[in-house]
Image (cartoon, grey):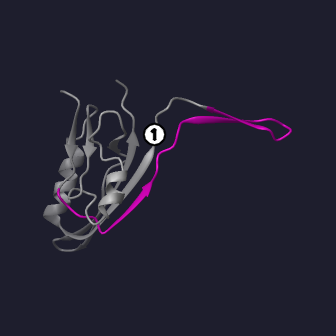
Amino acid sequence: MANTGLFFPELSPTSRRYKAPRYPETVFQAQNGAVTFIQFGQQQVNAELDLVFRNITDEDALLILKHYESITDNNWVKFSNTRGLAGMDSDLSSHLPQGNDTKKLRWRYAGSPEITSVYPGISTVSCKFVGVFYGA
């Protein structure tokens, strides 16, 4: 199967948490307190994105679950202003990695979606993603 990004379902989260990526580095600290940083590469990695969808229909919860199941080793998650990033100011959402550019971070599920049944037919779903840099 070819490497490809799969768009997240067209759903708007009720809340999100984003942690910006950082450069991979190692810190060495001498006994006298002097610190040396060694940076590995010029690509930031390990961004984090948590999305919560409160009180959505079970049908929408199933869309998220099926999307999760469709992501394989060769796939990643793509977002857009209507798919997972809805409700954000366009300037802010355009600054976040969306998984569309092959030279930027690509999103992967950091774990399986968590589904909580609120009452019959209504659920709350939490998803966690990590932004990784796919090697060429």
Decide which of 131, 53 is in the foreground and name it: 131
Report the residue at 33% width, 43% height from top.
108
Give above or below for 12 relative to 113.
Answer: below
Is 71 covered by the magenta stretch?
A: no
Q: Measured along the vertical axis of the image, is residue 75 above or below residue 122?
A: above
Q: Residue furthest top?
A: 136
Residue 84 against residue 34 in the figure, above or below: below
Q: In this rendered view, identify the residue nearer to me: 42 or 112.
A: 42
102 horizontally vs 65: left or right = right
Q: Quadrant of residue 28?
A: top right
| Residue ID at (16%, 55%) | 63
Residue 23 part of the magenta-drawn span: yes
Q: Position of residue 10 (x, y in %)?
A: 17, 57
Q: Quadrant of residue 90?
A: bottom left
Q: Nearer the viewer, residue 4 or 38?
A: 38
Which residue is outermost to the bottom? 119
Dot 1 corresponds to which residue? 45
- Which residue is at 55% across, 29% downward? 40
Give the magenta part as a residue range: 10-38
Question: Hey, what amino acid is under mark 1?
Answer: Val
Q: Residue at x 34, y 33 (%)?
A: 103
User: Circle 1: is it few (<14), some (14-19), or many (20+) Cα within 10 Å?
Assistant: some
Question: Where is residue 127 shown, x and y percent of the image?
Answer: 33, 56
